[in-house]
Amino acid sequence: MLDDPTLLIPVDASEPDDPALELVELLRPLRIVVLGYYPVPDQAAPQQLSEEYEDEATAALEACARRFADAGVEVESVLVFTRDRVQTVDRVGNEYGCDAVLTTGAVGSLNHILVSLKDETNMFRVLEVVRLVMMAGDPEVTLFHAESVERGSARSELYLRGATDWLVDRGLDRDAITWVEPTAETQESELRELAGDHDFIVLGESEPSVRERVVGDLSNRVHDRTGKPVLTVRRER
Amino acid sequence: MASGTETQLERTLGFKEALMIGVGTMIGAGIFVLPGAAAGLAGPGSSIAFVAAGAIAMLTALSASELATAMPASGGPYHFINKGLGPLFGSIAGLGNWLGLAFATAFYAVGFGNYVDPLAASLHLDLGVVAAVPLSGPQIGGLAAATAFIALNYLSTDGTGDLQNVIVIVLLGILGAFIALGATQVQLSEVTPIFPQGSGPGAVLPTTALVFVSYLGFAQVATVAGEIKEPGKNLPRAMVGGVVLVTTIYAVSMLILLGVVPLEAVAGEGTAIAIGARAVFGGFGIGVIGVGLLTFGGLLATASSANASVLSASRINYAMGRDGLMDTRLSEIHDRYNTPYRSIVLTGALILVFIVAGRVNALAKAGSVLHLLVYGLLNVSLIVMRETDATGYDPSFAVPAYPVVPALGALLSFALIGFMDPQQILLAGGLVVGGIVWYFVYVRKRIDDTSALARYRSPPAVEVEVDVDFDIGAGDDAPATRGGDTDD
């Protein structure tokens, strides 16, 4: 399913900030694509900014990539001048065959991991990543699933129980896995509150709604709100 | 190891976004500012003038599509002319394009002021400045609006592109409602005779000259050619589609406006369309809503046109600096905001001066005259590119009916200048002289002429395979395109 997992790590090339290595350690063995995106305002031509900043940004990006390379990971790096970060992450993700996107953030320990199981088509890929992470370290995992109010909570509970069994069947410790008891009132927005109590969030990519196109997708909102690293598992392409 | 990082420029504009850029820039002036003045000149016949202006714009839009797919780099019309005809014409076109945009922006800003003025008056917002300075209400509104756009663009505004889409859709909705409701109430007697007393078919061309400013936006699409996905397909569609859409809306709205209100009521009025809305929506008992909607539309439309033009103007400064026709210090990028702040400030200062100095119709024609000059040269440049078999010229879209379209485009663009007022014809002449002087004083000693025309006239002494890369935008590790390899 994930034979040669490839991780895309977008970094803002205009304000380079070294992504935490701890996260990468968890997901080995893997291949990393470091995407330096350089935001271009409407007022300037992308070409002009690339002429101005290409050397500087490339140097910063390669310094960042070198840290992963030194840790023994296979790294590629690409610098993109763009007006639309979301589109760029998506396109580069496709081009380099990336399985997941890591939005980096402040990490201390990685003991508490929150997993959102919203996306059904992608569920096993998300769980596979969770399995890899749990094999590598010894974290506690909290599973989360929310249905709409109309649909109630029965399906949520079955998803969560099923996911737990799936992981336990693959040799993981049942005690390390907990899930949030769903009720009819459990809302997606609770994910953001839960995120605050965890070190690291794993979620599946989903089709952005109109609202998400305007305010940014879920992974970014969670990241913006909590400052926690978010791993978004992409669909199979 | 992480050596050899690849650099890419993201193409973020699809067909819809490209179309919105063109339509968003165009839809402001024609229908929200000029109908009063146009009606005063040619009555219902001004619809014909809108169609004629649209047809001339269409010819150039076709030529610009071909040129832009061959060399999709920042700079638009200026860039095509510089590459085809060399730095002498490049200087004329660059200055013309830049100043033309500044005039057009000043015109949009005063148009915006036209809509603010009655609002301010109805709210009794007499700020005391009106009496103190010798400026009209619309001019003061225009100055305030222009200052705001300049400040916004200096600081860089994220997501104005998305906002632009929303604005255009709202505008199309408002005008659609105006047209649909208006169509049920048109009195044929109002629009006949087509030409009111005191005017005749002879009034069409001067009116065309006045309203041509309504179509300047299509070329904005060409200035962002490097950012359009599948430019060979999307660029011509967006430019041609935009001109067709806008021409139709203008001509139909004009007929409906004059079909529902007497000519005398709107002739010469700055907010004629709002007057028309009172009648159109009033027929359904919602006159106030109609006036409100169209006033809102007028503010949105003129603002989006002005904003888009400020953006384009700084692209031209940058492109001229890149090609050595202007000091690159002018297009320097701000450390913090990443905007070409000096260029924005200088263009902004010009816009403010033009608002103070000019009357609205004069500003419209000044903007048009300089663009017509550029459009004429653009068509000539296409012919030169084709006839000289320019190296590396490989457009993915070809102009139909060559050479008729570009020849007619050049001819009609230059000819329309003749229907402007002497003042603007003088401005065009002054600009040509200014461009020539600029070339000899500044440009000539700095750069070599590597244009298609120069290569044709004095081909390289030794036959060498020269890799000319017109598409600077896509070239990451492009071998240099500049002289040196051929000029001895």
Image (cartoon, coloured by chain):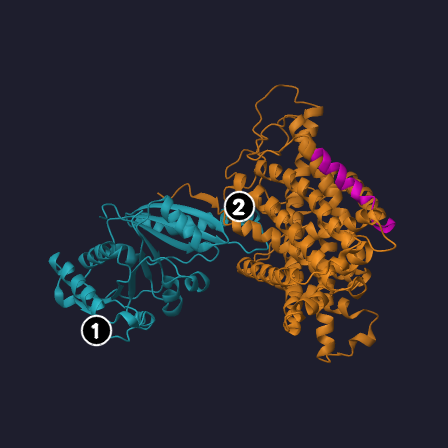
Chain colours: A cyan, B orange
Residue pictured at 76% horizontal, 37% vertical: B411
Please tell me whether the stretch drawn in magenta is mainly helix, strand or loop: helix
The residue carrying pointer 1 sits among few (fewer than 14), some (14 to 19) or many (20 or more) residues within 10 Å by Cα, namely: some
Determine the residue located farthest toward the top in the rendered image. B462
Based on the picture, tell me whether residue B407 belongs to the magenta stretch: yes
The kind of residue tagged 1 is Glu
Q: Nearer the viewer, residue B413 or A25?
A: B413
Give the numbered dot on residue A181: 1
**Left or right relative to B384: residue B234:** left
Mark 2: few, some, or many residues within 10 Å (few <14, many ≥20)?
many
Where disc 2 sits, the SS reads loop
Percent x, y of residue B176 = 60, 60
User: Horizontal placement of A226 versus B345: left or right?
Assistant: left
In which chain is the residue bearing label 1? A
Report the side of A129 relative to B420 (left or right): left
Residue B228: mark: 2
Q: Is residue A236 visible?
A: yes
- In this picture, which residue range is highlighted in magenta? B406-424
Q: CA distance from mark 1 to mark 2?
A: 48 Å
